[in-house]
Amino acid sequence: MSKEPVSHNPWSIHPVKFAIIPKLLALIVALPSTLRAAPESEPNDSLALADAVSFDANGIVSVTGAIFPRQDLDVFRVVTPPQQGTFSLLFEIVPVASDRALDAWIQLYDATGNPLSSKIDSGGDDIREMLNFTQARGGTTYFVVCGSADWSSSGSGEYVLRIVTDPNDQITEATPLGQAIQTVSTSGQIDSPTDADLYAVTVEAGQRLSFDIDNTAGLDSLIRLFDRAGNQLATNDNARGPGPEEISNVNSYLEYTFGSSGTYYLGISGAGNATYNPVTGTGDSSGSVGSYTLVVSPGLAGAARVNGVATDYLVDIVRTDRKRIVPQQRTWVIIHGRNSSRSKPNISAVTEAIVATRPGEQVVTLDWSGAAAYPGWVGFGGEDAIENVGAWAAAALASRGFSGKDLNLVGHSWGSYVADELAERIPGGVNSITALDAAENAPGGYSPEDVGVIDFGRDSEFSWAFHSDGISGSNVTPPTADEAFIVTNSDHGNVVFLFADLLLNPQNPIGRLFSLANLLLGSLGPWVADQYVSQLSVENPVGGYEAVIVAGPSGTSAQAILYVTNAPILAVTSHISGALVPTSPVTLFGTATDAGRGGSGIASVTVNGFRAANGSAAQSGVANWSTQLNLSAGANLIEVIAFDGGSKPAVTTNRMTLHYAPTPEAALSVSMEEQSLTLAWSVGLTGYALQYADTLESASKWHSISVAPITVGTSNVVTLEGDQGRRFYRLLKP
């Protein structure tokens, strides 16, 4: 069929010549199979008679029409939604199946009838035509003219016209996500095959971000990353993100380390639309359409569900310094509990305490606040997400290359159970678990107090558990740890503050017992196991606790600790702490015995990390240990440790300080002037007397000089006036 390369004047039905704007782009798209659109109202063949159409809540206009006869024109008037700056409008005319071989075209005019853009013909009947106008403004009236490009009268028929606002397909229109200091999740829609959504994110130099497309509905997604000049830095189609919920399908996943700080741009489109220009918004090609969820994270991010709830809740693991999460190094993972998050004051406090006391080690937080806040029945529905969150975290960390020996988990409330579920899924378990008031069992399908569900000792090399002895915490699960402690005068949330305070005060006798170094070494404390029972009127008594920590008035710091000790008795008998020592080296000695403390004997005694001589004894015997120490001038900190002979040795540590003040050399200087003699010696020579003698014969008599010395700088000075004759002088310490 021959074609008519002309355009039409919307003020009348007569064709006029129309100059096509050079920067037009034909966009071929696929529409949903079911199109719901309002019908046109005839007559509407001029601007004066134009049909008024409007955008719906999704920013879309959809209207049906018919070009018949061939010379028919359909004119529509539309006012754009109010918004700042310029954006793109996509005009799409689609001949429908019942047409008469319509070869459609589109023209766009401003409110006064001036032509703005046109798409005449893509070359064929029943072909979709698309016009992309990139200079649209909010609150502006535009006229859209639809017609036929055919000469023949058979070139007519029915169509659907769609107009779509596309405000974020260029860098200047990008949706801001802000500074990448935490995980951000947002939803979007690729409305047409040529649509692209751009997002702006601000990063620090050296920061690594992950970009994850999830929850797609019909969309085979594509991710592209650009710098501010529009240069593509990375792209991905169909990669699999971390976590068990991720599958290799039509989703996309990308990680990138940014060499420079600044703002960068992420483009989301359908697969196939991989050549669009993020600066101009042009250059599109046809891709798929549909909805998506974008997750941008400075760490590991994914989703987990509450059992029985068809909602994906965001979960993520982020380093406290927002740097890249690196495997094969010691890592601390802090996990919050019910109705909480990583930013809650008590969780922040324990996180900061670990950062402060373990410099150079990696500290991350696991946030599952969405699922943890799910109300369910009587407010505890989030408990049924615990297993799923633990499974996600285990898979995410394993996918990054972590092994259990690298991981040290600290959980509060439900977070204690997330920690154990995570650890149980890591081959061989994790290095350590610290459970801070693991939660009481709540109504629901998850039952942590059932035998075998939670076992902190089973799933780690070494574990601690602290129980507030209140109704919010379980008294059943803490004793599954290697060491469990009752905390009185505190509560469910304050136990976390108390533990942080212990970490920050290692010089405190109680804090010294809970140094993280002891946890990492698996060192049992100086207590006999299983001596205390947790019991409230509302719960059955449960034993298996090693000690009772008594909190101060605020409940956030430890005031006392009660335990039955099995640590050996250690004494230093040669010196007392704080003593002044005039010579070096010194011989330090003392005794050690396990008599009355289990009779396991003394395996060794160390002084500043070195074995002392004779530092062992059998059963209830006494080790008379000794060692020689070289001292430095000033204060010398000395640590003496006795280890008993048990299978997991109990230890006693004594710390003391010796002050070494070397005795200065007893030197006397003499200087003479015409009628005086000056003698001087160091002020450090205390207790010395100045004497003289007339001869050095053995029977000579020494006489004290009665003139009192004066201090000049660092010297004691005595001046004798007149001729002293021939004499000898000395300093003598009686």
Image: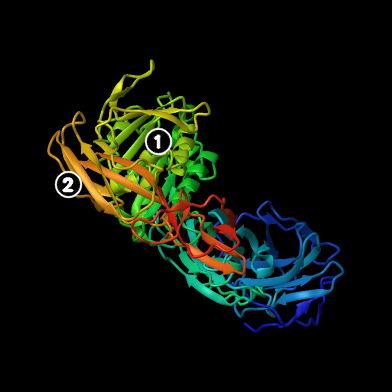
Front-most of residues 602 and 367: 602
**Residue 525 horizontal side relative to residue 623, left or right:** right
Residue 476: in sight, yes or no?
Answer: yes
Q: Position of residue 394 (x, y in %)?
A: 35, 51
Q: Position of residue 524 (x, y in %)?
A: 27, 39
Vertical arrangement, residue 561 with respect to residue 710, above or below: above
Residue at the extreme top of the image, as rendered: 537
Front-most of residues 457 and 146: 457
Residue appearing at x 76%, y 65% in the figure: 85
The local crowd at label 1, few if under 14, some if 14 to 19, many if 20 or more residues have their Cα within 10 Å, is some
Front-most of residues 272 and 231: 231
Of circles 2 and 1, which is in front?
2
Vertical arrangement, residue 33 with respect to residue 477, above or below: below
Residue appearing at x 45%, y 64% in the figure: 253
Q: Name the residue under label 1.
A: 510
Can you say which quadrant of the picture contains the N terminus?
bottom right
Q: Which amino acid does label 2 sit on?
A: Asn
Residue 455 lies in what quarter of the image? top left
In primary-sequence order, the first of circles 2 and 1 is 1
Q: Where is residue 409 in the image (x, y as percent from the top left)?
A: 37, 46
Q: What residue type is labelled 1?
A: Ile
**Residue 168 horizontal side relative to residue 694, left or right:** right
Q: Residue 6 carries which label?
A: none
Element type at marker 2?
loop
Q: Do the residues labelled 2 and 1 touch (CB within 8 Å)?
A: no
Residue appearing at x 71%, y 55% in the figure: 55
Residue appearing at x 42%, y 23% in the figure: 471
Q: Where is residue 589 in the image (x, y as percent from the top left)?
A: 25, 44
Q: Name the residue under label 2.
A: 614
Mark pair 2, 1: CA separation: 30 Å
Element type at marker 1?
helix
